[in-house]
Structures are given as C-alpha cells and as structure tokens.
Amino acid sequence: MFAATAIKSTDKKTFYRELSGQLEALLAGESDPVANAANMSALIFEQVPDLNWAGFYFLRSPQELVLGPFQGTPACVRIAVGRGVCGTAVARRATQRVEDVHSFAGHIACDSASRSELVVPLLRAGEIFGVLDLDSPMPGRFDAEDQDGIELLAAIYIAASAPIIPGAQA
Ligand code: SME
C-alpha cells in the first residue's frame, strides 16, 4: 500500500521534487490512465496546501472536455474547447495561471470558493488529450514555481499512463 508522507519543506522547489518522487512511486507499475489520474488527484489534494479542487478533464472529442477523476466538490461535466480556463488551456495549447478567476472573462465557476486556478494541458505526441486543473480559494495561490512543479507532475503522469481513447467513456 502507498502511504504519502507529509512534505514539510517550505521551499517550493524542494516540495515539488519530493512530491514528484511520491508520484513516481504511486504510479510505478500501473499504466491505466483513469486509475493513475484518480490516484494523482488524491495525492495532489492531500499534499498541495490551500486547494479546493484538483483533477482532470479529458478530450472526448476535438471540441469538448469531459470531467475525469478529481478531488473536491462535484464539478461541471462538459467544457467546450475555448471556454473557461480549462477550454482556454486547450485552445491556446498553454498552461493558464489565473491569479483571480473573477477577472478571467468566461471563467466557469464550478465551486464558488475558487479564487485562483492553474490549468496544465496534457500532450502526447504533440496532441492535447486533456488538462490537469487545480483550484484554490486563495487569490494568487499559484506562482511560477507552482506552475513548474505541477507541469513536472503532469509530465510524470503522461509518461506513466497509457493513452486515453478519444470518444470512449472512462
Ligand atoms: N473553472 C474551470 C472549470 C472547472 S472547475 O474549476 C473544476 C474553468 O473555468 O474552466
């Protein structure tokens, strides 16, 4: 059984290095993309301070993200590409780090407690297949070091997991 030990480091670089090691151990020997997304959401939600939501959306068609495994309050199921922070990350093929979701035009409020958000697109062979989404009740919760750290975790997930089949239901 995997037991995550609390990470005490206050230095973010060290924190994410330790969390990456825990994620690699958690995903070792398993390639199911849904199981890995579920365990990764749980690990992030348990270890990263000040989150109210952490999870995945997967592209089920070229136009639409569909909710995947997550931790937090129940969330919007379908997000069109180009809409909200998640759909914008897909459309722009770039991480979206939003300091204050209230000033992001088109932000989709799944949990009214959310004040800042970090969305990392997931790519395999140059194709986006989903996003990793973190929400915080604190404005400006995510800085460039958080972005680097979460992008590293996303890369570990992609390397460890088999492809999600577009159009198939998880
Ligand atoms: N806020 C996101 C929607 C997903 S929830 O935060 C879980 C968005 O604007 O795309």
Image (cartoon, grey):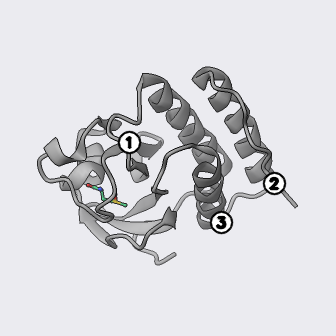
In the figure, 22 relative to 114: above or below? above
Q: Amino acid at mark 1?
A: Leu
C-alpha separation, residue under disc 1 versus residue under disc 3: 22 Å
Q: Amino acid at mark 3?
A: Ala
Q: Which numbered tag is attached to residue 118? A: 1
Q: Would you identify the image quadrant in which residue 21 lies?
A: top right
- Residue 96, position as x, y percentages in the image: 31, 38
C-alpha separation, residue under disc 3 versus residue under disc 2: 12 Å
Seen at 42% across and 61% down, the residue is 58
Please state if 111 lies on the left or on the right of 147 as rendered: left
Q: Nearer the viewer, mark 3 or mark 2?
A: 3
User: Of helix, strand and loop, which one carries label 2?
Assistant: loop
Of the image marks 2 and 1, the number of the one nearer the N terminus: 2
User: Of helix, strand and loop, which one carries label 3?
Assistant: helix
**Crowd tier of the residue under label 1, counting other residues whose Cα lies within 10 Å: few below 14, some 14–19, many 20 or above:** many
Q: Which residue is mark 2?
A: 29
- Residue 36, position as x, y percentages in the image: 65, 59
The quarter of the image that holds ligand 1 is bottom left
Of the image marks 1 and 3, the number of the one nearer the N terminus: 3
Which residue reaches farthest bottom?
Answer: 169
C-alpha separation, residue under disc 2 versus residue under disc 1: 28 Å
Seen at 38% across and 42% down, the residue is 118
Please state if 87 lies on the left or on the right of 67 as rendered: left
Q: Amino acid at mark 2?
A: Gly
- Residue 33, position as x, y percentages in the image: 60, 61
User: Of helix, strand and loop, which one carries label 1?
Assistant: strand
- Residue 94, position as x, y percentages in the image: 32, 35
The answer to which of 48 and 34 lies nearer the viewer is 48
In the figure, 170 relative to 147: above or below? below
Of the image marks 3 and 2, the number of the one nearer the N terminus: 2
Q: Which numbered tag is attached to residue 35? A: 3
Please state if 19 lies on the left or on the right of 45 as rendered: right
